[in-house]
Image (cartoon, helix red, strand yellow):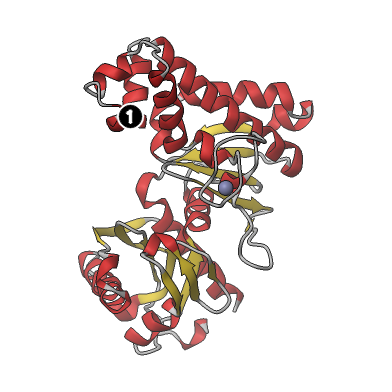
Amino acid sequence: MLKNKPKKAKYLVGVDLGGTTIITVVTDIHGKVIASVKCLSEVKEGVKAVINRIVDTIYATVAKAKLQIDEVLTIGIGAPGPLSTKTGIIIDAPNLDGWVNVPLRDLVKKAFNQKIPVFLENDANAAAYGEFWIGTGKNVSTLIILTLGTGIGGGIIIDKKLYRGPDDTAGELGHISVFPNGPVCNCGNNGCLEAIASATGMVNRAVDALRLGRRSLIRDLAEHDLNRVTAKMIYQAVLKGDKLAKDIMQETGRYIGIAAASLVNIFNPEMIVFSGGMINAGDYLLDPIRDEVKKRAFPQPAKRVKILPAKLGENAGAIGAAGIAYCELKQD
Ligand SMILES: [Zn+2]
């Protein structure tokens, strides 16, 4: 496929399609971002409108990079799943307002007259690949990435390759059970890491404690309306030395650490990288994770593994999608 492209095609496009925003980047083949554009996805307008928006944004980003569209070697799209990387179809995406069986890859390919190869990847895997390619995980071969936000996503890179599993469902690290009778998770299981230690899970635990009458600055930050408590408020209260906020943050880190210790024993990774909004809490969150890993995992892999924050921020998914598409193209 490479030889069919015009010689001057040497840039990559990466798209991160989310339920709220679409982030598009143009990079060189080493992952250096030349231009990026962010817009709202407006998924409620339907599949056709969103595909048009993706295509328009790709043109806009290429123009911003002062390039022509025929200089684009390949397009990678990271999207919420479940999806199939083999067929390029989004099977059923609750985060995209219920898209069912949408052949996203082929629709985008058609919009560029079949001239540019397009690859579809799971969004969490794309973000993981971005961190591995040019972020915190650069120069390591085996790493695990956990994205801590409203939910908890994951990605597994083994010997420099993304591990997808036969059904593209590997890496659902937010759904490791850590508490047998814990709260019900979005997936239907009880006590998944996501249900307890995501931003949502952390807020729920804080609100439960406040309802029981615990005194805390969090209550003031939420102006005494417990429906308004956010993960950010918990972090702000931690910085001011609030006891409950510190307990909640520490407990969150402990649960994540329980899962991380198992991952260390299973994969012997060189690194576990944490991304997402919650890492703004820095070592307040990462230190209890490190302690738990030290306490629970086998000594040798526990000593090797580095537990670090991600570097790329919100562009990780788009950059990773570009990198995966380039990788797939080279394998064709
Ligand atoms: Zn779950």
Total numbered badges shown on the rendered structure: 1
Q: Is residue 306 visible?
A: yes
Crowd around label 1: few <14 · some 14–19 · many ≥20 (10 Å): some
Ligand 1 within 8 angstroms of badge 1 C-beta: no
Question: Residue 118: percent from the left, percent from the top?
Answer: 45, 77
Say if 271 sits above or below 242 in the image: below
Residue at 42% x, 10% y: name it: 243
- Which of 298/98 is in front? 98
* Quadrant of the rendered image containing residue 290: top right
Could you tell me residue 332's position as x and y percent?
59, 79
Location of residue 53 by image quarter: bottom left
- List x then y, in percent, for residue 160: 64, 55
**Type of residue at label 1?**
Lys
**Image point 35% across, 90% down: which residue?**
113
- The residue where tag 1 is placed is 232
Residue occupying image coordinates x 38% and y 19%: 210
| Residue farthest along the front direction in this orientation | 212
Q: Secondary structure at mark 1?
A: helix
Q: Position of residue 246 (x, y in %)?
A: 44, 16
Residue 31 at least partly seen: no
85 above or below 275? Answer: below
Instruction: State left or right for residue 258 relative to residue 12.
Output: right
Residue 190 higher or lower than 4, as above or below: above
Residues 292 and 29: in front is 292
Using residue 177 as the reference point, say whether residue 222 is left or right of it: left
Q: Quadrant of residue 206?
A: top left
